[in-house]
Amino acid sequence: MKNQKILFVSLAANQAVFFLKIGNALKSQGFEVGHVCFHEGSQKDLSARGEIVYNPYREVQEDWESLDFGRFGIESPMLLLGHEKAAYELRNTQSLVKKFKRNLSAMTCILNRFGKGRPVTIIQELGGFTSVLAAYYAARHAGHDNYFIEPSFFRGRMFLTKNSLQAPVVGDEDMAPANPEIKRLLNEIVETQTVAIPIKDRLHYRSAFHKLTDARSVRRLLAKVWSKYVKGEKEEFDHIGGHVLRHLRMQWNTLRLRGSYQHSIEPGFIYYPLHVPADFALTIRSSECLDQFALIDFLCRITPLGRQVVIKEHPAQVGSASARRMKDLLQRHDNLKLLHPSFNNHEVIRLAAAVVTVNSKAGAEALLHGKSVLVLGDAFYRTSSLVTRVPQLAHLEASIRSLLGESAEKDKAEIQQYFQGVWNRSYAGELYYLSDQNIVSFTKSILKIVSEK
């Protein structure tokens, strides 16, 4: 492994600190490690520590504005720009085009400098921002490998997806009879109704009000204001005002929906768990389902008579759904129920007749309960024989009626075997968790994927 080159891409200070620790562990194994920081404060900090680190805001080719997206294999740049439009609530397409081109140019320069004609392995968190996408497309154009990191189904596990924006696939080669530890974990999840939340995301599972007003959030807000407006430093997440306004609106939406939340439900309904509105899983992987209100409206109109459609907001983004559009749906469809956010997802799934999802982890949780699952998008469980893949919305009604007519229970051993495959397909480690044990586990996982090349 000596002299192999690994380049970490980070967008924020906590990411840079984490990858610094992983990088130091890899350097002790003989790797040459570099960092790209789309956060100038972190770039300065890592540079002061003597790290090989690049500032993409200063690395750019002279003719970057004439860059051709097709040269990088990007056939639909507008589709890719949809993530930042949704996440930052922007509409200036030309500004985003320039940003994407500049980032592509910067990453091309950085890879040329760091690689020096040799293969580079890029490692970064999965995301749809042009910074992340530019690193991916520039790497693939130059023949380098890119690994995207995203949480697995199991706590403390992650998927490392090579050279693809699609969800990872759990294949036949991953399958095996479930070992006693996996059986124990699966039974524990069902019995305790545990929702596996990645450590990096735990602070998101709070109300918008608490996200804005706790001491840590206030300190981070002030630090961002100081960095941007006083020090003049650039970073990816610099839409400060928009972030604050969005959370204020989320709190207002929650207040407006107080009278619309249901606190009890009867069994036998069709359950659609709302996804995080601007998540990569929707904006890039399943962009045709980005407008979830339109999808829910269609679901209400095709659900068989006598069945209810039950929806619940994602617990990490309560209030992110427009109260105006939600109230409009509830007014037009008396077979639609909006559950209070406090409902445990496992309890809702247990009472459901079937679960319709785009790519939510709730689909995998539904499998644990032996429920019928209809998958509309690019989920990691989409290829499993345990779910029903719906390739087009036009087929959804027939699929629902077919599943509701089935009475056979799913084979528990087959379900457990599938989740053993999910475990085998994933790797040990948690993003941005700085415990010594996690650093060791994460580093071993990186060593494993590099040795598999």
Image (cartoon, rainbow, N blue to C red):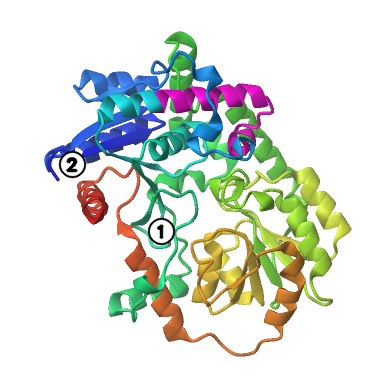
The relative height of residue 52 versus residue 179 in the rendered view (above or below) is above
> Which numbered dot is residue 448?
none
Magenta span main SS: helix
Query: On the image, numbered disc 1 is attached to which residue?
Result: 152
Residue 307, placed above or below residue 314 = below
Q: Secondary structure at mark 1?
A: loop
- Where does the magenta region start and end? 80-107
Measure how far apart labels 1 and 2 are at the Cα level. Answer: 23 Å
Count of picture labels: 2
Number of residues whose C-alpha sits closer than 10 Å to that of mark 1, classed few (under 14), some (14–19) or many (20 or more): many
Q: Quadrant of residue 271?
A: bottom right
Give residue 138's quadrant in the image. Answer: top left
Q: Residue 63's spot in the image, x, y percent?
A: 49, 15
Report if residue 94 lies within the magenta region.
yes
Looking at the image, which is closer to me, 73 or 7? Answer: 73
For mark 2, does the 10 Å Cα neighbourhood hold few (<14), some (14 to 19), or many (20 or more) residues?
some
Q: Is residue 111 visible?
A: yes
Task: Give the image location of residue 173, x and y in percent.
Answer: 35, 72
Tell me where residue 102 appears, x and y as whole percent.
49, 22
Horizontal arrangement in the rendering, residue 273 relative to residue 73 (left or right): right
Amino acid identity at mark 2:
Leu
Q: Which mark is residue 26?
A: 2
Q: Secondary structure at mark 2?
A: helix
Q: Provide residue 119's location: percent of width, then percent of height.
A: 26, 39
Drawn side of residue 3 relative to residue 123, left or right = left
Mark 1 vs mark 2, foreground winner is 2
Q: Nearer the viewer, residue 257 or 404?
A: 404
Amino acid at dot 1:
Ser
Q: Are marks 1 and 2 in contact (CB under 8 Å)?
A: no
